[in-house]
Image: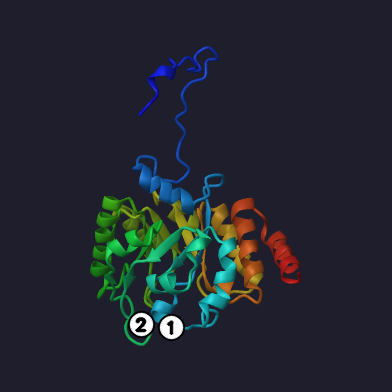
Amino acid sequence: MADLDDLREGCNFGLGGGVASTNNSFHVKGAEHLPWGMKDRLSRIFNPKTGRTVMLAFDHGFIMGPTSGLERIDLNIVPLIEYADCLMCTRGILRTVIPPSTNKPICLRSDAGTSILTELNDNVLIDVEDAIRMNVSAMAIMLSIGDAAHEAKTVANLYKAVDKGTRYGIPVMGVTAVGKDMARDARYFGLASRIAAENGANIVKTYYCDGFEKVVAACPVPVVIAGGKKLPELEALELCYKAISEGASGVDMGRNVFQSEAPAAMIQAVHAVVHENLKPEQALELFNELKNK
């Protein structure tokens, strides 16, 4: 118990110097009124100094198996972990390969279903207790807007995950799925992103497109862009730069990092674009310098 013999009355309240109590605005869009635990987890993902994030996505194996660049997670991904702000992966890979000593926030792929061998998007939720046991910072749920067969099911997966995540203080990232019949434009991505946020997603992952600033403006939570298919390094860096310039809060890249000719150099170049506002040509110079070391 406290030592009452040395109980000293407080006297320094900062009143004499006119210093008011601080009431700082939170650095993550749409999270100002969330509970402390949710804010703490979002602060692990989004750098408090920039409000942005570089997420490294390597959850592709849950539908694609050992695709190029992900044949050996221990050899191809673990060396990149130190350069990422957040890791996006499945629970199987997290448990078996990712060292807990890395101490990086995890965005856990929290739904699973069909593979590339069948019809995609027929997903179900995993148990939220798994996310709690693994101390993840967010749960990622796919949302298939415009897919007549699976839209309602994936929206239900999202709001159920939000219900459970809110109960335990774990944010949810809604991930926009794009089917072959869906238009890849601002109207569609704006619709899908807004639906994700309206159903409680704390983060939205979607694709960059013409008119992307409208997608961001209409979404009340942070938008991070997917890298999509493998691009030449300069084009991938231009994609990052344009998205950040138009309001994205970060990137969640996979193939454009781990399928690069120099993955460690590439993720550092992406990091410089996102957090230091390097222009694509400057970031490419950095990539080449790091590649040749």
Query: Label 2 crowding class (10 Å Cα cut-off): few <14, some 14-19, many 20+?
Result: some
55 with respect to 260 (left or right): left
User: Amino acid type of disc 2?
Assistant: Ser
Please name the residue shown 48% across and 17% down the image.
13
Q: Is residue 72 visible?
A: yes
288 with respect to 250 (left or right): right
Q: Measured from the top left, where is residue 150 in percent x and y?
A: 26, 73
Q: Which numbered disc covers residue 65?
A: 1
Query: Label 1 crowding class (10 Å Cα cut-off): few <14, some 14-19, many 20+?
Result: few
Question: In front of the other: label 1 or label 2?
Answer: 1
Tell me which corner region of the image, top left, top right, bottom left or bottom right, holds residue 279.
bottom right
Q: Measured from the top left, where is residue 82 in percent x and y?
A: 58, 62
Q: Measured from the top left, where is residue 204 in percent x and y?
A: 40, 58
Q: Measured from the top left, where is residue 174 in percent x and y?
A: 36, 61
Which image quarter is the N terminus in?
Answer: top left
Mark 1 or 2, nearer chain start? 1
Above or below, comparing residue 278 to residue 89 in the picture: above
Which image quarter is the C terminus in?
Answer: bottom right
Q: Is mark 2 on a helix, strand or loop?
A: loop
Please name the residue shown 52% across and 62% down the image.
102
Q: Which numbered disc covers residue 115?
A: 2
Please name the residue shown 35% across and 82% down the image.
115
Above or below, comparing residue 259 to residue 14 in the picture: below
Q: Which numbered disc covers residue 166?
A: none
In terms of depth relative to the viewer, which is nearer, 273 or 293?
293
User: Amino acid type of disc 1?
Assistant: Gly
User: Mark 1 touching mark 2, by CB under 8 A?
Assistant: yes
